[in-house]
Structures are given as C-alpha cells and as structure tokens.
Image: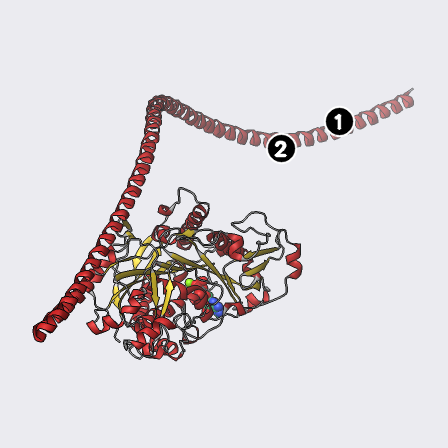
Amino acid sequence: MEVQHTVPAYSMLASKLRLPRGSSTETSLAGVTAAALFAAAGAGGGGRDKTTEALNESSYAHASDAMPRAATQLRAAGVAANRGAAVRTSGARRSVSSGGSSCGVNGVTPTSSFGNGMRGTGAVKTCMPMRASVGMPSVGHRMRGSTSDALCEPDQGLSERVKVLVRVRPAVSQTERGGGRCVDVSGPARLVLHRVDAPVPVSEFGFDTVLPPTCSQCDVFNAAVKDVVDDTLQGYNGTIMAYGQTGAGKTYTLGNTEPDAIGMIPRAVAEIFMQAKLDPLHSYHVTMSYIQIYMEMIQDLLCPENDNLQLREDASNGVHLPGVKEVAVSSLAECLHHLELGDRNRIFAFTHLNAHSSRSHAVVLLTVVKSRRLLTHAEKEAVQLAEKEGVVTHKVKVGKLYLVDLAGSERLKKSRSVGVRASEAISINKSLSTLGMCISARAADGSHVPFRDSKLTRLLQESLGGNAKTTLVVCVADTQLHAEETLQSLTFGSRAMCVRNRPVINERVDVVTLDDELIGRLEGERSRADAGGGDGRSDGGGAFLQLESEHAQLAAQLAEERERHEAVVERLRAEAAAETAEAQASLEQSEASLGEVRGLMSEQASALASLAVERDELLASNRALAQTHLTQVSELSSRVQALLAQHASMAAARHAEEAVTAALREDAATLRVQLEAAVAERDVALSQRDAARADAAEAAAAAARLGG
Ligand code: ADP
Ligand code: MG
C-alpha cells in the first residue's frame, strides 16, 4: 500500500475542519516492523540517515491483542495481508503511566518497571503530614492515594485532565555530581525532593508518571507521546510540551537526533508514518510547520523572512498563524530535513539576535489529514463488515500535534544575566509566568484566563483547557545545585495536572470520496446491466436500489453533519457574542476609566500651566535680581580694584618709608656708636682732667705745706 500524500482538497478542508463531533468508533492499525516504512524513506543528510537507520533497526512489536477481530475480517477479505488492526472506542481512557501494550521505536519498557533510582524514603514518608485538600501539591505535603485520584478528578465524559510526566535527568558534570543528588523516585508516579538547608527539606509529589534518571527515550515515548500521536491520527489535537530550567533536558527529550537517543519529535513523526503505512483504508496528508517565539516575536524557522508572524483567531480556524510556512512531508527523512533546516535558521537567527537555543520557545506543528482512500467496489464489499463496526468511516479527520520545547525557566538572579540576556530572561520569564498564571486560572476554573498576555499562551490556548489532549513533560536535574529550580518545575507540573481539556475529534463527512465511489459503482452497474440483458437488469435494479439507499444514507449523514455544523456555528456565534459583550463591557469600563484619567490629566495640565506661569514670573524676577546683583558686583569689583591699586601704592610708599627708616636706623646706630666712642673718649679725657686736677691740687697742697 502506498501512502497518498497529495490531496489538495484536504489542505483546504484542513483549515476548515475544526468541528467538534461526539464520540465515535476509532481505528488504529499497527503490527509490522518499522523497516517496511523506512525502506521508502527519501534521501537525507548523514545525521538524518543515521537517525532513520536507528529507527529502522528498531522493532515495532505493536500490540495486536486488542484488535484481532477487525484484522481477521480485513485479512479474510484479502484487503491487507500481514497487517494488524484495532478497534478502539474514543471514550476509552488511556493510561499514560502503565507503559501500555504498545511500544515506541526502540522496543518495550513498561513504566511500571521503573524503580527507585536512589536512597530509600521510608522515614521521610512517615514524617510528612497528609494533605487534606486535593489539587495543587505544595512543598512538604504528601499526596493522597494514587496520583491521578489524589490530585484531580478522574477523566469524565468529554473532558480529560492534562497528563504530566516528570523526567529526571542524571547529573551530567563533575560539579553537578559533587553537589549531591536531590530527587528520589519513590514509585512509577511519585518522587521525593530533598533540599539541603531548606526550611522544608523534604517534599513529596505525585504525577501521572515519574521516570528516573536511568530511563530511555523510548520509555518517555511510551509513557508520554505514543498515546497522543495515536489520538492525533484519530483526529484529536495533541500537545506535548517540555518544561524545565535551562539544561534540564527539554531539547534532549524532544529534539535530539543522535541515533542512540532519538528524541520525541522524530519518534512521533516515525510513528505517524508507520501507522499511515499500515493503514490500507485511509490516505494521510501530513504537513509541518516549525516556529520559534523569541522575545514575543514569532519567527518562521522554515521561512526566515517571516520573522514577525501575527496570531489571529476566527471561528473556523481558532487561533492560527496566517502566513506560516506549512510544508507537506511524506517521510521521516523529509521531516528530519525540514527540522535540520529550521534548526539552521534558528542558529542564524540566534547569531543575528545574539541569542542561543534555550532563549526561545520552539514549536513544531504536525497536521495530519486522514481520509478514506478511494476503494474499488471489490474492496468496498470486502471491508463492509469492518465498516459496519465503525473501523472504516466516511470521515475526513484532521489532527494537529504541537511539540513544544519551552525556553528555560531560569532565575535572573542566579543566571546573573545583564543587557540583552537580561531582557531575554525577563521576556522568557514573563511568557512562562503567564503560562503558569493561565494554568492556575484554568486549574481553578477561573473565568478570566490571561492567554492574551503572551504569544506563547495565545498559541497554546487550545492545549490548556480547550480542544486538545495535552501531555506536559517536566524535565528536572537530579542535583542539589538546582534543587530550588526543581521544586519550582515540580510545583508547576502539579498545578498543570488540574487543568481539564475538552478534546473532540475534528472530522467531517468525506463527501467527495463517497460520491466518487457511488458514481463508480453506478457506472459499473450500468455497464453490467448493458452487457447482461434481462437478468442483468434485475441485478442492476437491485444495485440501483442499494445505491439509492446509500444515497439516502449519505443524504441523512449530510443532514446530520449540517445540523452538527449549524449547532457548532451557533455555539461559536453565542461564544463570540458573549465574548463581544464581555469585550464591550470591558471597553466601556476602560472608556470610563479613560474618561477619569482624561479628567485627571486635564486638571493636571491646568495645574501645570499655572505652575508654568508662576515659574516664568519667578524666572523674570530672578533675572532682574540677577541683573541688579551683577551691576552691584561689577561696581564692587571696580571699587575693590581701586582699593587694591590704592593699597598697592600705599604698600609701595610704606615699603619706601621702611627703607628710609632702615637707612635712618642704620645711620642712627652708626652715630650712636660714634657718640658712644666720643662719650668714652670724653669720659677718659674727663677722668684724665680730674686726675690732673687732683694731681695739681695735691701738688698745690704740698707746695702750700712746704711754703707754710
Ligand atoms: P534544555 O533544553 O532543558 O536547556 P538540554 O536538552 O540542552 O537542556 O540538555 C542539557 C545537557 O544535558 C545536554 O548536554 C544534554 O545532552 C544533557 N542531557 C539532558 N538530558 C539528559 C539525559 N536524560 N541523559 C543524559 N544527558 C542528558
Ligand atoms: Mg533547550
């Protein structure tokens, strides 16, 4: 059987087919080796070949236990040999944690075999308090009972819970190993987080599945992705989202293409083509888009010129990206080629914008349009029985699968980002915190969910509480160094477990195929009648009657479809009207607040104007004062100049005076010396005279005595 890829009418239909449909019988076909699928894979690059080869070598031991009846019918009809078939009811709940009976690309490893990867936790468990309420688990509180029962209500009717799988990655560096471990996987759906030196050092969490550090990519596929891919092929929208801090293993889990650890995106694509190959009754048209959201800009990685795509929403397409490049892919190799191309463009964009891969959210969107193959009359009769049981339907089903590699939820303080890096981190944190707020609002059944606050949440709107089956893969690192981030990621995952989606099969009657078949049969009958004469006429009459009844059935189906369509349009109209009314109310409220703000602004403007007048007056008086001061200062300055000149001349005169005084002093000193010398001489002369006088008197006395 060949997979039919070129169905132009379907791409048009694909954009229109978002009509919900009640439960119906679904078909899944599986059962041979992957080699058969990949033998037809196109040429690719070296890495691509290795990845394709690695997937080729793996054996698809698909479960056929639940599907032997339909397979037998088909085999007996000679339509398909060596094929298995399954009949599954859409309402059936899938079990994510059980590991299931089907396997991924590398064989089966049931998740129930995942044991405790590290130290025992008995003591911890007994000392932790039991939490009274269900819902979001909080630090230091143990969950009640089994995970899904304990955390949120079980799936009911059309609504089902977001599934959460935690993947614990091993420490990958010496530093991380040196820091010690922090996660203890205590069961297939439980883990205990140890935080050294934290106020609450032990926290226990329950999820749908917890995979230990030793788990393989295949385990992740089986536990988180396989069911979503199956559902996508049945016309449901599916989302696989990887969340965690930078370096926790999101890209490794989703996008890795190394042959020994192939990620979920190549595995999902391989699974889609495998199942398409194994289905003899339907043709599959697969398209893919690859975008990234970097600092609130949506960039098309398959067409880099589209570097700021805008999100739009309308009743028929929901939230979508007009202008995004959608490439048709018909093999894993082709898909890998486009992924490589996208990654290259991503690197270019990063160099251009100075960013690296963990700084943007990357989204791969696979759209699968599944429609009935045009069957010959013989084939049609052969599958009649199966058709009656709902294995084959006249429906076109469109399933969209989003694979989302979220940017790292790092802490700005810890990463010490600055400049562009800080802006990136702020933008990432904003979109992730909006994601968290949307999840909280959805989990709490809040009426307002802030989807519009970020491009990421707007794009993923349907995946968070809408028409989609969503699985969140929380990646955490088993090292004490990142224990705080691990706690934050686990808390986020716990909250996500309370979000309920309402997935419906996106399908419509494939009128074109049905008409072609009926016309073919009509012509066959007519030529048989022409060739066979009377007997043929009676046969032909019977056939015509059958055709007529088929036409009637078709008309009834169409009427039913139309009714359903009208109901959906009505519902959408009502929703749109409610939204419009809400928007109108909020607009009116905004206008009222705007009026208030305007009033305040005009008051402030007049206050500002009077302040400006005051300011001008003050400025003028200040200017006049300044002028007066200036004049006074210049007068003072000239007076000071004159005084200074006067002072200088006085100083010069004083200086001259001092010189004269000094000279006079010198002269006086000389005269004093001379005077003192004269006085001394006079004193000597006087003493000599007195001595002479005394001598004379003595002589006179002596003479008198002598004379007397
Ligand atoms: P993220 O995308 O979350 O920032 P990556 O996927 O780039 O992180 O992983 C960071 C590093 O850790 C890579 O070198 C990757 O190979 C390694 N790694 C991640 N998960 C695992 C794992 N489960 N086993 C081994 N190595 C892993
Ligand atoms: Mg990454």
Q: Can residue 8 be seen at all in this image of the molecule?
A: no
Q: Is residue 517 visible?
A: yes
Residue receiving disc 1 = 686
Spot occupied by residue 643 in the image (x, y as percentages of width and height): 44, 25
Instruction: Confirm or deny contact between disc 2 and disc 1 (CB under 8 A).
Output: no
SS class, disc 2? helix
Pick the front one: 241 or 3: 3
* Kind of residue indicated by mark 2: Thr
Q: Secondary structure at mark 1?
A: helix
Name the residue located 60 percent from the left edge and 32 percent from the top edge.
Answer: 666
Q: Is residue 595 above or below residue 265?
A: above
Name of the residue lying farthest toward the top: 708
Residue 522 falls left or right of residue 235? left
Residue that carries the numbered disc 2 in the rendered image: 670
Name the residue at 34% across, 76% down.
83
State which quadrant residue 585 falls in: top left
**Residue 578 lies in what quarter of the image?**
top left
State which mark lies toward you, 2 or 1: 2
Task: Give the Cα distance between marks 2 and 1.
Answer: 23 Å
User: Measured from the top left, where is residue 93 in percent x and y?
Assistant: 43, 60
Q: Amino acid at mark 1?
A: Leu
Using residue 456 as the reference point, say whether residue 514 is left or right of it. left
